[in-house]
Every structure is written in structure tokens, then in C-alpha cells.
Image (cartoon, rainbow, N blue to C red):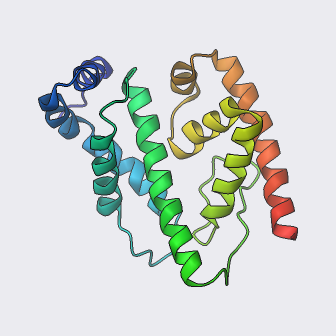
Amino acid sequence: MTTPSPNEVTQLLLAWSQGDRSALDRLIPLVYEELRRLAHRYMGQERTGHTLQTTALVNEAYLRLIDASQVQWQNRAHFFAVSAQLMRRILVDFARARRNLKRGGGAQQVSLGEALLAPLEPDADLVALDEALTALAAIDQRQAQAVELRFFGGLSVEETAEVLKVSPETVHRDWRVAKAWLLRELSQTGKQ
């Protein structure tokens, strides 16, 4: 199967936004493999033996995407950014439920490492990262979105700039500042 053009995906997204239910049916086969790669990347960051599998994560995201029919899709990059955010929400909800079952026992600190592009350690605490991103969003929403799009969504600087409607230089700056802020925040969380 050939890779669909960004324009083809964008046209289907726009048609879906305008109420064409068949557009979603034509869209999913075109984007499924990329959604699986995205889900696989997320699952690779999870602990070994995670009960949620890649296909289940894609399917859950698909179900939530169907409910997002009111979204005014901008383009392919916007679709994958929303998909990445949905997958992050699913995994965070799953991690919170698991943590609540353990009554908080065994929670571990997230190590983002120097580059933040490196995948999280399998035993990293996704909940702590989510809380830090939420705190960052309260201070600077765009920086938090840049991290989410780049780190979780796997979007390039250019794609992130397109989604956020800013220049690539602004994305680079937001990315550097947000990484430093998150590293500081997570190191303070680990000391408490």
C-alpha cells in the first residue's frame, strides 16, 4: 500500500469535520499504520508486561476519535497531534488506575534524560510527567503543546510549527525552555 499524500488525508479530515461519515471510513485505512507506529512508540516507553497492547491502544484512540467528530481538523499534522494526545490520555488514565490500585505504592520518578527525545525508561512514571506537563500548560500552554507534539506525537519541528501556527524558530525556543523547566520540575518531584 502506498503512503497517502498529506493533502488526501487533509481532504478526508475536512470532509469528516463537515459531517461526511464515510470520510472517516476512508480515512482510517490511510492512517492506521501511522497510528500503530505512534501507539508502538508509546507502548515501547511503558513497563514490560503492560496489559494494554499496541492494537488495543489504537482501537481505544479510534473510539475516542469517533467522538471527536466536532473537531475542526486543520490538516494531517493536527490529526496526528490529537491522536497522540488521546493516546497519552489513555495511558495516563491507565497508569492512574494502576497506581490507585496500588494505593500509591511503588511510584517511581520519571527520568527525561538530557535530550527528552530519548524514550522514557520502561518503569518511568507517566503520571508524574503528565502532572508536570499540566503544570507547564498552566504557565505556558504553547510550550506544553510543543512538548506534547514533539515528544509524544513524534512530529517534526516543522509539523509542530504548522499545528501551533508559529515559526520553527519559536518551536525550537519553546522546546528548549520547556525541556529545562520539565527536567527541573521532575527532579523536584522526585525529591519530595
The image position of residue 70, as x and y in percent, is 33, 30
Identity of the residue drawn at 30% across and 62% down: 56
Q: Quadrant of the N terminus?
A: top left
List x then y, in percent, for residue 72: 37, 23
Vertical side of 167 occupied by 140: above or below: below
Q: Is residue 33 above or below residue 78?
A: below
**Residue 14, located in which quarter of the rendered image?**
top left
Q: Is residue 120 left or right of residue 22?
A: right
- In the image, what residue occupies the spot 27% across and 42% down? 66
Q: Can you give x and y, in whole percent of width and height, for residue 151 in the image?
A: 59, 44
Residue 176 is drawn in which quadrant? top right
> Would residue 14 appear left or right of 82 to someone viewing this image?
left
Q: How many marks?
A: 0
Q: Can you tell which quarter of the image residue 181 is in?
A: top right
Taking depth in this image into account, of 4 and 162 the one nearest to the observer is 162
Image vertical order of residue 63 relative to residue 171, above or below: below
The answer to which of 154 and 141 lies nearer the viewer is: 141
Residue at the (82%, 43%) spot, across then down: 180
